[in-house]
Amino acid sequence: MSTARRWRVAGLNFDHFHMGDLLRLVAQHPHAEIVGLCDAEPDRMQPAARSFGVPPDRLFTDPDACLERTRPDLVILCPAAAEHAEWTERAAAHRVPVLIEKPFAASLAEADRMIAAMAAAGQPLAINWPLRWVPAHATAHRVVEEGRIGEVREVHYYDGNRGPLYHGADKVELEPTVEAKARSWFYRQARGGGSLLDYLGYGTTLGTWFLGGAKPLEVVCLTDQTPGLEVDEHSITLARYATGLSRFETRWGTFTDPWTHQPQPRCGFVLVGSEGTLTSWDYAQAIRLQTRAQPAGFDLPVDRLAAPFRNPVEYFLHCLETGRPVEGPLSPAVSRIGQQIVDTARRSAAEKRIVPLIDSVTAP
């Protein structure tokens, strides 16, 4: 990237603890700086302010005041899932590019509001899916693009963690309490909580990436119903594509977190192609391939990711500087297909039936 430009970045809304991870990427970028932080609860900003040396005069509780006074080149948003549209529209009013943490939104209608708001503002939108930056999954996509397993016909996905309250920014381990769960938006249906909204978009969005943009024809989903909880902690979704069936499973309550010790079942992806198969586990150092030439299978070391494709901040700033469109899972186009599947899965679980893919917010 050009050394002439210094990118000014503001972080708004600390509902999702991934804000700390994203701000660290800004702090580590040689040509970016944090110019403002904003949250309605000042205490939630303090760890980031201390870690990244953000002075008190750059801390705000009013997002409009933050944007007006700091004039950022990029806004990072980490609100509760059900508030993504509201916060994106607020940033769009200031005509500033937006990088928002996953999921895309709590519904397709809200995702479309976000797309419309940013289009009207003439600014790009990127949706960050942290699994996109896992070297194993990036390598898997490269192998798929090279045609080494032929046409991808099935995606099998299982992912999750012990639960959203067991860790904070930078994967710092926490011990959740009953009180913490009662306060957390992750366990509130109205705010977009639950394992399905937290993790299904990962599988369906990266799955769409692996499938070259293909959409399923219909979807069926089951979720658990834990007494005393408003939201699910386990969901299983089946999607029928023209090429066959794919499976997406989300789980809060894995035995271990995949970034420390892979649980069983393992977290990650299995891809079945016309000419081979591929497994890509979260955080693995190699992916496993079967091909017609080597049906016994072999390990392929993961790629070492290179700039500007190592993390979402680096990548999005590169897009802004070069004028290139956001591509892959971070693009609204691919993420919208993932959201269509998520919306259809939620309707299926609620109505306990197979549902045709929801193609618009007015679909029956």
Image: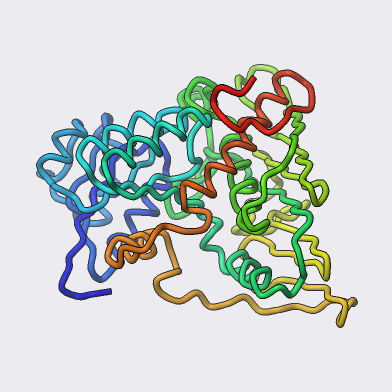
Instruction: Give the position of the N terminus as an image quadrant.
Output: bottom left
Relative depth, front residue between 239 and 191: 239
The residue under the point 64% across, 37% down is: 341
**Is residue 158 placed above or below 105 in the rendered structure?**
below
Residue 360 quadrant: top right
Q: Which residue is farthest bottom? A: 293
Q: Quadrant of the C terminus?
A: top right
At 26% from the left and 51% from the top, the residue drawn is 74
Picture coordinates of residue 31, whole percent (x, y)? 23, 68
Looking at this view, is 266 or 111 the one in front? 111
Q: Vertically, is 28 above or below 333?
A: below
Coloured how? rainbow
x then y, percent, for residue 330: 47, 53
Q: Position of residue 257 (x, y in %)?
A: 63, 51
- Establish if 341 lies above or below 75: above
What residue is rendered at 70% in x and 71% in y? 287
